[in-house]
Image (cartoon, rainbow, N blue to C red):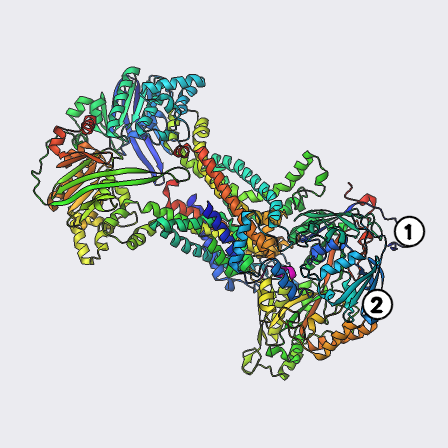
Amino acid sequence: MKNKLMLTGVIIIILLILAAVFAPKIAKYDPTYINIKEALLPPSEEHLMGTDMLGRDLFSRMLFGSRIALTIGIVAVGLAAVIGVALGSIAGYFGGKIDSVIMRFADIMLCFPAFFLILAVIAVVGPSIFNIMIIIGLTSWMGMARLIRAEILTLKTRDYVLCSRVLGASNFFIITKHLIPNGIGPVLVSFVFGVAGAILMEAGLSFLGLGVQPPDPSWGNILMEGKAVLGVGWWVILFPGLAILITVLAFNLLGEGLRDALNPRIK
Amino acid sequence: METCPRSNNETCPRPTRGDAFVVGNIGDARTLIPILASDSPSSYIVALVFSGLVKYDTNVELTGDLAESWDIEDEGLAIVFHLRKNVRWHDGHPFTAEDVKFTYEKLIDPAVPTPYGGDFKMIDRLEIPDAFTVKVIYKEPFSPGLTSWHMPIMPKHLLENESFVTTKFARAPVGTGPYKFKRWKSGERIDLVANEDYFEHAPYIDRYIYRVIPDQATLFLELETEGIDLMSLEPIQFKKLTDTRFFKKRFKKFKYPFFGYTYMAYNLKDEKFKDKRVRQALNYAVNKQELIEGVLFGLGRISAGQFVPESWAYNEDVKPYPFDPEKAKTVLAECGWQDTDGDDWIDKDGKNFEFTILTNQGNDMRLKTAEIIQRRLKDIGIKVDIRVLEWAVFINEFVDKKRFEAIMMGWGLGREPDCFDIFHSSKTGPGEFNFVSYSNPELDALLVAGRRTFDKEKRKQIYHKVQKILYDDQPYMFLYVPDSLVAVHSRFENVKPSAIGIGYNFIDWWVPKAKQRYRY
Amino acid sequence: MIPILFGITLISFAVIHMAPGKPTDLVTQLNPKVSMEAREKLNKIHGLDKPLYVQYLDWIKKIGRLDFGKSFADSRPVIDKIAERLPITLLINVLSIFIIFIVSIPVGIKSALRKGAPFDKISTVAVFIGFAIPSFWLALLLISFFGVHLGILPVSGIVSLDFEKLNLLQKIFDLSRHLILPVFVLSIGGIAGFSRYMRQSMLSVEHQDYIRTARAKGLPEKEVIYRHALKNALLPIITILGLSIPALLSGSVIVEKVFSIPGMGLLMFESVFMRDYNVIMGILIVSAFLTLLGNLLADIAYVYADPRIRYEK
Amino acid sequence: MLLKVKNLTINFKNDDGPVKAVKGIDFEINENEVLGLVGESGSGKTVTALSIMDLLEKKTCCVEGEINTSFNRVRGKNITMVFQEPFTSLNPVLRVGEQVDEVMLTHEKASAKEARSHTLELFRKVMIKEPERVYDSYPHALSGGQRQRVMLAMAISLRPKLLIADEPTTALDVTIQKEILELIMRLKEELGMAVFFITHDFDIIKKIADRVLVMKNGRIVESGLRKSVLSDPKNEYTKKLIDAVPSIGGAFPGKGKKTGEVVLEAKDLTKSFYLEKGFFRKHSSRISAVSEVSLKIHEGRTLGVVGESGCGKTTLARLLVGLLKADKGEVRCPEKNIQIVFQDPASSLDPRMRMGDIVLEGLTIRGAKRREKELVLREILFNARLNYKDRMKLPHEFSGGERQRIAIARSLAVKPRVLILDEPVSSLDVIIQKEVLGLLKDLQKELFLTYVFISHDLRVIEYMSDDVAVIENGRIVELASREKLYESPQHAYTKKLLRSVL
């Protein structure tokens, strides 16, 4: 059952990535092409998911939206992972003052509700795809830093690490040969869950009008625009919502599967 | 005073008192001190609680409000207002000329952060010969001065010892208007009740409730479920969402002209745009009707210059350019812009004709407009980029510092046609409003004359010329005048849209007893 | 504690003061009647013409006295604005925590006990969906179904217009009708997450030696589960609950926006649009403080619940 | 006859298909006897016990065969069980007293007051000092011995007919072990119950069992009266098992006099730790782990270091190899070439590295060439009795004994002169234990190594050492040659330790 769920997640993610990569090839229409005469057409053969209030083809917009969702999710969390792993392993390995300064900083960052902090930064720098990626990255590294630090704290007392040290290994050797390969598992899991979270976050921000700005299609801002036609254009609401749901679901399934695979005890 | 809407055979039903009127809006008011209120929610409430000396009637003519009448003296150098007697503040204190003087003093007080000081700085001094006469003496004749006295008057007895930054008055105002302030639940609602002693007559509707619903879609859902009685509609809502039988039974839709227009401004310091023929050519290349269809769903008109068609200053003879891309190409070719290298973009001196339109984030209509213009200009070989900027950055970094090629914006206008600040060549300093650096001595002279002339016919002549020159010079590409769109619950009687909107006769609106929804 | 509080103020301040524009820009807008001079005047009144570190020192001194400055939008003290919005947000959040608790714990226990049974499978699927569903989308669907289509629940706000005229019972009823949807939407992610944690926690406790001991004693299954397993399984939940407060507060921005609830989240949203920096900084600090408070409460609850920690103290 | 097991078969449903844990066994337990069940880990002992208690999860295993009793089997009342791990067998969030009360409350419908006084009486019976205080304590506040007494109190609460004791002393220190065993035997006499005693340790069987069952891979390979099994084992495996048990007083050839050079010397080694304690992590207390330890080890000899858990043995080992820095004193080792082998081979091998890479890690760190590494690998694997073909396998593919040999091989690959062995066989089954110890002895001869051998087990120490140091609370209380120490111990603590050996 578990494996099937994970497989479903993987397949959905692969399809999404394909859709994102080949969006220009698959999409029949330019996602920003406005055609007022065809506004708010229900789904049909011509327009698989109908058109929005400006007559833009929703299916094309959704395809290009998947690019934005995946890019933001992966880049933002990638940035968070780089910062988190760097700071977390430094803190965990060297301990002492460095550790307490880094972890105290992470504690402080964790005190802020993420959405509030992100909104505040957006208030300052303004919303854009680039800014959203950077902001989400800069405000979500703390969990991963804590994870890798905790891993390294236990790993560095493992007998094989001690042996390695007795055999004369350098810090660099120990970190790269023993600690990171053995400690990266939880970070990987957290990365996958993080992507799901970042996609939801981006959609939420765009939905509030503080994320990706029109005419760039993001699932969140398609939904925001769809809100205005709630009564007459159900398809403008339904498809982006489903897309977000399915994407986030897929990443969560993958994350859950990875976690089980890396931690056989909870089978 | 009011006319019966029915035909003569029927007896005209008498207005009944009672019920409440619930308005929904996405923003909360910020302050109810009239001279500080610059946002529209605050202005709605202020307009109901306070009165100015003058106001507009349905013909867009100035008429008395707190002032019964006025005289222009010394060839326009002075205005003498004769105030209504027996007007009382909501707390019972009598209204006098002292209050007008107090309001004036605050308007020009450097310690008061009011945005409305400008017109009042033209005043030399203000005298009050008696309790019900106010004499305003200007430094030089200043015709927009009279209009500026629609500024709501504030009670001296409550405010003279208060700091305008900290006073409680900002959230519990006392005025002379048709509704009295009752309560303000921040972010939620503002309650007003009818002022029984209002000097025109007591309003029929007992309560006015302003609800804050910060989301346009939720607001519309509230309207659909009759949670609110009035809201401004977006073009899509007006056209598409309100077409249901359910909706039509419960609501009446109104459409009336908006006083303002949307434009694309050129930086006239930019080499490309210096030649007025180029600007005219661009005007030929853009289909304004398409913009109105696409962006406004047909709910607007083509703008033919600085004034809206309802304004007395509007010149009927100025006709918008027709959509004629061929002519645009010809004119551009005359100016030396031609595709010489076969890359589909026209060029001159080896450089392609390309520019960037800047606009602010958060205004969909402007963005869509820019997108459609982008496509039309592509057809004649001009490459346009669009950049959306956060508002403060847009204004501070680009508009104020004149770091732009073209920008997409809109002006909201008053009824006074004076546009000295926008187009006079002396107003091009940083942060001033002639940011396109437009300069035309002929127009400068007309704008000055317009300000000094009081005779309406003469002013009309002046502003007709102003409009003609502006449209010919095209410092802006004038695009469209959108319509104001509202839905009002159908139980309200006597709702009559006019050139100045629908709210002007609110005190005469009423609901038949049987249809009243709020009864306590 | 003190360095954390200090860090919170520093980050809040730093985040806000990297801005290119001035917060007063939006107040003045591009109104032809507002001169450059008037704008300078506004900046001076709000102290925005001083150097940054002076502004920070001034600001932090005031914070000590709970003075977060004035809102640029309406010149009211920020603390007043937050104080009138906070109770609503707290109410919704506390209700959500309550709902999360009473739903997710039984669900988690039941699916752990019946691992692999239909209930477990259905709840697992529900949990995954609940975890992935965008709250704003769910809110829209619920509003249009219950509010517009069926017309049985209000669309927005927290009380009816005539709330004041109702008696106590009616007031409670009216408030509940308004709160059902927002609280549900705010809770959904938490319910999903906590059901999962509870299930996992219960499963891992199930295999502990002391559970075997309890069974070996011949205790009835119910007592094994509710007396021995549950207490231990709840321990990690307490910690996670403390950590989930920032997530709940984050969620209230969207929920309050969609349902037009005048709480702190909505205030944050509005302030962001208006660049009302003092309010933004105030909310950042208050929310961080709430998080700290939540963590502290969770720690205290943990100490109370886990004798091992009590002993060390 | 009290209990009769007939053709008991137990299958576990695993992801990779069913696993047979118990393959059709028959035995019986008579009234008032002690039946010992011996076997190595994984032989199916515990599963058998749990199936008698009916504690196996129905979902994951399938029990076939008959278990008949002469009485009405009521779990917790007339048939009870004591488990191996006293540290995890009590619920950490309930008071100890309450947990014992439950037995009475469940089976006798007694009032809380009655239950409490009954529990206090039980506590006295199992010789718990300060029963009132213990009653109100939480498990973590009790020592391992106390907890095991509490478990016993729980088990005898309602005078059971049969007590199943599953390795009840294995996790305890030797001195405590003996007390608990004696307690069980006394209770058995007092209450007239039968005891089904499960252990891996033939020494215990020798001491307490009336009859013995020997189990291997889910089958009973031998059964009979204690004496006959011990003195005349029929089965090969039983023989091996009995042989493998180290015993005190064996005659081991000594290495004669201390003649070689001193290869490792410690002077006045002292080390303390600061423990962070309490909710706000402010109060720290200083714990002295090793104080003023001085040692001298001559080339080619083995120094045994013996002590109970927490006495500072491990700290001493780490100080000697330089993993910890001493607060005071110094370690002198002329050639700076000391290696260490740890107790748990599962944790001392990086789970993601291949066996060959693990063994060669020291050379990799030293930057050795591939050819050189290849040569050393063949040689060292041969020495450590490991198969060269297995060099690409991952640690989890090896058995416990093999893993420990890999760990030893890794240390030897860098050609050390001194090897610190920190409980190298404690986690291994006896037969494997013997093999590894034999390997270590052979290696010592072949490679002329010097050992510091650390263990809690006096029997193993005697088998391995030339000289023995006894440690109590971080201090060496007695240091003497093996013969002298075992024959005429001087210090009271040494005597106590020796007495507790069964």
Q: Is residue B67 above or below residue A257?
A: below
Which image quadrant: the C terminus of chain C? top left
Q: Within 10 Å of the Cα at label 1, are there few (<14), some (14-19), or many (20+) other Cα atoms?
A: few
Q: Viewer-proximal residue, B441 or C305? A: B441
Q: Quadrant of residue D215?
A: top left
Determine whether D20 is above or below B129 in the image: above
Report if residue D484 lies within the magenta region.
Answer: no
Q: Percent x, y for residue C111?
A: 47, 36
* Image-based side of B108 in relation to D59, left or right: right
In percent of width and height, residue A116 lies at: 54, 51
Mark number displayed over residue B72:
2
For label 2, the crowd category at 10 Å Cα-Cα, with few meaning under 14, some 14 to 19 and many 20 or more, is: some
Q: Amino acid at mark 1?
A: Glu
The residue that disc 1 covers is B10
Which secondary structure, mark 1? loop
Is residue C23 a member of the stretch shown in magenta?
yes
- Residue at figure coordinates x 8%, y 40% from the top left: D258
Identify residue type, mark 2: Ile
Residue C24 figure quarter: bottom right
Q: Which residues are magenta?
A: C22-31
Tell me the CA gap for discs 1 and 2: 45 Å
Q: Nearer the viewer, mark 1 or mark 2?
A: 2
Q: Chain of mark 1?
A: B
Q: Are marks 1 and 2 on the same chain?
A: yes
